[in-house]
Amino acid sequence: MLESWRRERMVRKVMRGLARQHVTKILQPGGVWLVERALVRDKDSEAVLATCTMRGWVEPLHENMPTGQLTPDGYLPEGPMFTRAETVYRLTEGGWAALNRAHAWALTNTLLAAGSFVVAVLVARAQD
């Protein structure tokens, strides 16, 4: 149970990371995107992205996008700029809803409305 909770927490963390990314420049030639606040990819995040894809929360936007990393001080690396190719993902509408917990909010609002209706009916009957 605790392990499942941790996994779901990791799913939310990766989805928030996807939501924070934005393209700051498009490098020419080649039209390579310079992404600020890019999601750090490791074996765990790849498994989470596969889970999110399976759930319909993310979808591939670009396959095999050239990817590299700046040096710790923020400069371009010496030698090859791109060291690997990765898939760029985007959140779907369902992913945004899951990230914002839209279902939980809708359920809470429905329960509050039903409770308010019951109280209003009881008060109206008590006044008769």
Image (cartoon, rainbow, N blue to C red):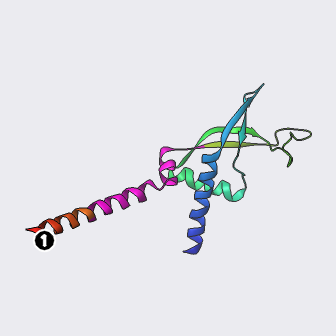
Task: Using the rendered image of the protein, determine whether residue 49 is visible from the camera's viewpoint.
Answer: no
> Residue 118 appears at what percent x and percent y?
21, 66
Question: Horizontally, is 21 left or right of 112 in the view?
Answer: right
Q: Residue at x 70, y 35 (%)?
A: 24
The crowding category of the residue bearing disc 1, from other C-alpha atoms within 10 Å (few below 14, some 14 to 19, many at least 20), is: few
Q: Residue at x 68, y 59 (%)?
A: 44
The quarter of the rendered structure image containing the C terminus is bottom left
Residue situated furthest top in the rendering: 29
Against 3, residue 26 (above or below) is above
State the count of labels. Answer: 1
* Residue 80 among those drawn in magenta: no
Against 23, residue 8 (above or below) is below
Residue situated furthest left in the rendering: 128
Q: Within the image, what quadrant is residue 74 found in?
A: top right
> Residue 91 appears at what percent x and percent y?
55, 45
Q: Residue at x 72, y 32 (%)?
A: 25
| Residue identifier under label 1 | 126
* Dominant secondary structure, magenta: helix
Q: Secondary structure at mark 1?
A: helix
The quarter of the rendered structure image containing the N terminus is bottom right
Is 14 in front, or is 125?
Answer: 125
Question: Horizontally, is 21 left or right of 29 in the view?
Answer: left
Against 6, residue 26 (above or below) is above
Stretch in magenta: 90-115
Q: Within the image, what quadrant is residue 111 found in?
A: bottom left
> Residue 113 appears at what percent x and percent y?
29, 59
Label 1 sits on what residue type?
Ala
> Residue 7 appears at what percent x and percent y?
60, 65
Question: Horizontally, is 38 left or right of 52 in the view?
Answer: right
Residue situated furthest front in the rendering: 127
Q: Residue at x 64, y 57 (%)?
A: 47
* Residue 108 among those drawn in magenta: yes
